[in-house]
Image (tube, rainbow, N blue to C red):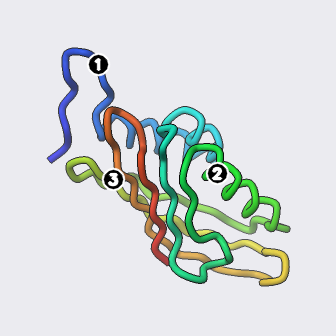
Amino acid sequence: MTTTKTNNSIPTTQDVATRFNQLAQQEKWFEIQDELFADNVTSIDPPNAFNLGYAEGKAQVRKKGEDFVKKIEAVHSAHTTEPVVAGTHFAVGRQMDVTVQVLGRLQINEVMLYEVKNGQIVLEQFFY
């Protein structure tokens, strides 16, 4: 069940997921952060994953993303699935074939989970 839009026009989880998908299909990840993330957003990667770990706050989450992008030497392919919405959460699948400094060429298959509150993403968590 998705959340429903209230009279004060706060975007629903489905609204946020739809906009997220529009931007993700264009690989506009920093635009997603700028437009959809709350100031107090939290980002969590699996333990010991590419040294990315945990970040809290929009600026730190942005830096975490920028640090990862700086390490990418080549993107061979990338694809994001349509979102699946459930209550205040949505998830997408992401497949990337990238060459990363020090690590070499990697095929990353992950589930990206997002939590929405008051029309903004407050949590992103990656499973891979």
Residue found at x 61% / y 52%: 61
Q: Which mark is residue 9?
A: 1
For the residues labelled 1 and 3, the Cα–Cα distance comes to: 19 Å
Image mark for residue 60? 2
In depth, the one of 93 and 55 nearer the eye is 55
Q: Residues within 10 Å of mark 2 (few under 14, many from 20)?
A: some
Question: Camera-side residue: 38 or 2?
Answer: 38
The answer to whether residue 85 is left or right of residue 61 is left
Picture coordinates of residue 62, whole percent (x, y): 66, 48
Mark 3: which amino acid? Phe
Sequence-first disc among 1 and 3: 1
Q: Position of residue 72 (x, y in %)?
A: 79, 66
Q: Quadrant of residue 19?
A: top left
Q: Going by the picture, which residue comes out furthest to the top?
A: 8
Q: Position of residue 52 (x, y in %)?
A: 64, 70
Task: Relative to 70, say whether 115 is above or below.
Answer: above
Identify the secondary structure beneath mark 2: helix
Mark 2 → mark 1, Cα distance in angstroms: 29 Å
Report if the CB atoms under discs 2 and 3 are less than 8 Å apart: no
The residue at which mark 3 appears reads as 90
Crowdedness of circle 3 by 10 Å Cα count: few (<14), some, many (20+)?
many
Q: Are marks 1 and 3 in contact (CB under 8 Å)?
A: no
| Percent position of residue 73, x then y | 85, 68
